[in-house]
């Protein structure tokens, strides 16, 4: 009977749960799904991470290549994040060029890297004006069950923390580039921004870490990215209007989540170092 | 046809000298500036200008049809070159904001499309685009739940706030926040930020922007009454 009720009246079905302050998957309104983090799972990439947020799975790989820097910024390397939402991860995506959502997510990742300044682009310099590293950060969604933004951010930061680059020597006379895969150095990542997404249900209820079903019923969404106590970004693209207090609640929850997530990354990195 | 101008460094410098920074720059609007559309407006906020036009409610492509409400489309055209991923993000922000504002359930199985052409970006471009879209919707007499007003605030390194920043203010600021408010309770519809900031700065910016939004709504009212007087 519950199945039929859910099919016919998804919103009413959901409201019944919310009356008891619980969600269909037994979570409380402010509770995240279990987060699984696996760092360094791709041996062919310079850095990698796999994040599972409930069923949502995102894989991130960092590949490095050398390139010539821009003339106006001779010391700055490049970071090229790209999010792929292929037909593999959900029936709502079609094969072909990236759709709007994938483009917006990629742009969000690029904005996040730029505003949080977690990577100093000058650290990617090999030889000023001649050679710099380009880091291609590819994020592939393997299973789309809502809240891909948070999963992508976590995967991105974990993969960058795992990234190590080989030493490069340039032959002065011939201009040949040699990499030494035996002497790897870790890429310095100065901070750890963590994103927390919420949806607004029925114009006033805030739910953290939405599943795909919940996202479909949402009347709005908010994403807060914090780094320690500081805000890196608040992203609320339209939807239902919120009061100032509701925004404050979102920030409070995001700060709390940031502590949990940073601890998780730290512990995972520590366990692979041993 | 809009005229396109090249921005010179002297102009930017001259702009810097202008007026106090705690008020919005002067706004002017030209409702119905184009004739073939259902609604059109050319809006300038200071030297930032954009043209917005509205078509609809009109027929909708079958694959975009929604049976219970109108499909809202927003197309943003940058001044130079083709739209890039950052423009896509901007389009999505504007679409989600306008979807909330437009009473879409009054026009099921139809489309309301808003096209925004950037003509001059000298700071607070997103705000100008959203405000021009709202005015164009008013000009087209599309039914709306409420109006929207967008205000940009730049936060300097020393936590000073600049309302409606110019291009130079934006590049010098440590963060730039764009807020959109509704016209009923002045609640927050949209927040977009760029750059780090603290919670207290966010609160301060929010209060400042909310006050400024009220003057934007007043400006809408004046523009509309001027248009209605002209048509009498």
Image: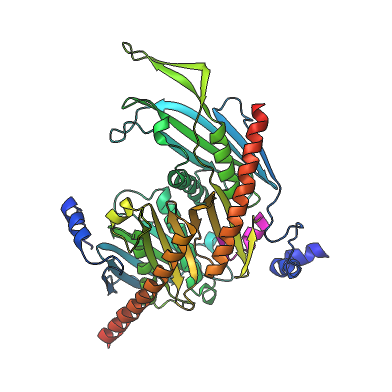
User: Can you give x and y, in whole percent of width and height, for residue A106 in the image?
Assistant: 49, 45
Q: Nearer the viewer, residue A198 or B64?
A: A198
In the image, A77: left or right of A5? left
Tell me residue B169's x, y (percent): 30, 56
| Residue under the image location 27 percent in, 86 percent down | B229
Magenta residue check for A220: yes
Could you tell me if residue A147 is visible in this image? no
Q: What quarter of the picture does the C terminus of chain B occupy?
A: bottom left
Comparing A115 with A220, the one in front is: A115
User: Residue B153 at what x, y percent from top left?
Assistant: 37, 62
- Is B176 situated left or right of A27 in this image? left
Residue drawn where x is 33% and y is 24% of the image: A130
Q: In the picture shown, does residue B81 fall above or below A24? A: above
Give the vertical position of A265 relative to B202 (above or below). above
Point out the stretch of residues depicted in magenta. Answer: A211-221
On screen, residue A155 above or below A74 = below
């Amino acid at each position: 009977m519950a199945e039929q009720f859910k099919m016919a009246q998804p919103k009413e079905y959901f409201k019944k749960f919310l009356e008891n302050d619980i969600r269909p998957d037994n979570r409380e309104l402010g509770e995240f799904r279990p987060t699984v983090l696996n760092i360094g799972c791709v041996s062919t990439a310079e850095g990698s991470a796999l994040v599972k947020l409930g069923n949502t799975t995102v894989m991130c790989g960092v590949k490095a290549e050398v390139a010539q820097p821009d003339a106006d910024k001779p010391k700055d390397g490049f970071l090229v994040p790209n999010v792929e939402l292929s037909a593999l991860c959900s029936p709502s995506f079609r094969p072909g060029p990236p759709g709007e959502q994938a483009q917006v997510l990629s742009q969000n990742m690029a904005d996040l890297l730029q505003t949080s300044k977690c990577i100093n682009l000058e650290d990617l310099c090999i030889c000023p004006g001649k050679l710099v590293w380009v880091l291609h950060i590819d994020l592939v969604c393997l299973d789309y069950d809502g809240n891909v933004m948070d999963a992508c951010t976590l995967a991105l930061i974990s993969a960058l923390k795992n990234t190590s680059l080989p030493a490069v020597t340039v032959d002065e006379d011939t201009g040949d580039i040699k990499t030494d895969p035996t002497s790897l150095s870790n890429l310095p990542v100065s901070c750890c921004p963590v994103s927390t997404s919420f949806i607004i249900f029925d114009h006033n209820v805030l739910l953290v870490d939405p599943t795909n079903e919940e996202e479909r019923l949402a009347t709005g969404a908010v994403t807060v990215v914090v780094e320690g106590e500081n805000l890196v970004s608040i992203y609320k693209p339209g939807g239902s209007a919120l009061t100032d207090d509701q925004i404050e609640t979102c920030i409070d929850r995001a700060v709390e989540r940031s502590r949990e997530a940073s601890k998780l990354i730290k512990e995972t990195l520590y366990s692979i170092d041993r | 046809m809009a005229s396109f101008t090249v921005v010179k460094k002297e102009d930017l410098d001259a702009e810097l000298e202008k007026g106090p920074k705690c008020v919005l720059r002067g706004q002017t609007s030209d409702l119905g500036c184009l004739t073939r559309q259902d609604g059109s407006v050319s809006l300038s906020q200071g030297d930032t200008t954009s043209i917005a036009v509205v078509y609809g409610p009109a027929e909708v492509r079958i694959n975009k049809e929604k049976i219970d409400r109108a499909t809202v489309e927003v197309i943003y055209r940058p001044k130079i070159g083709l739209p890039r991923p950052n423009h896509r993000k901007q389009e999505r922000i504007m679409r989600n904001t306008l979807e909330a504002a437009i009473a879409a359930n009054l026009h099921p199985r139809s489309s309301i499309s808003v096209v925004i052409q950037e003509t001059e970006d000298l700071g607070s471009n997103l705000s100008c685009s959203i405000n021009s879209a709202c005015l164009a919707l008013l000009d087209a007499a599309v039914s709306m739940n409420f109006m929207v007003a967008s205000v940009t605030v730049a936060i300097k390194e020393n936590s000073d706030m600049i309302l409606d920043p110019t291009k130079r203010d934006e590049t010098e600021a440590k963060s730039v926040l764009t807020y959109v408010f509704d016209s009923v309770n002045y609640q927050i519809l949209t927040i977009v930020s760029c750059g780090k900031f603290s919670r207290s700065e966010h609160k301060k910016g929010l209060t400042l922007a909310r006050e400024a939004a009220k003057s934007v709504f007043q400006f809408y009212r004046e523009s509309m009454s001027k248009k209605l007087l002209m048509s009498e």
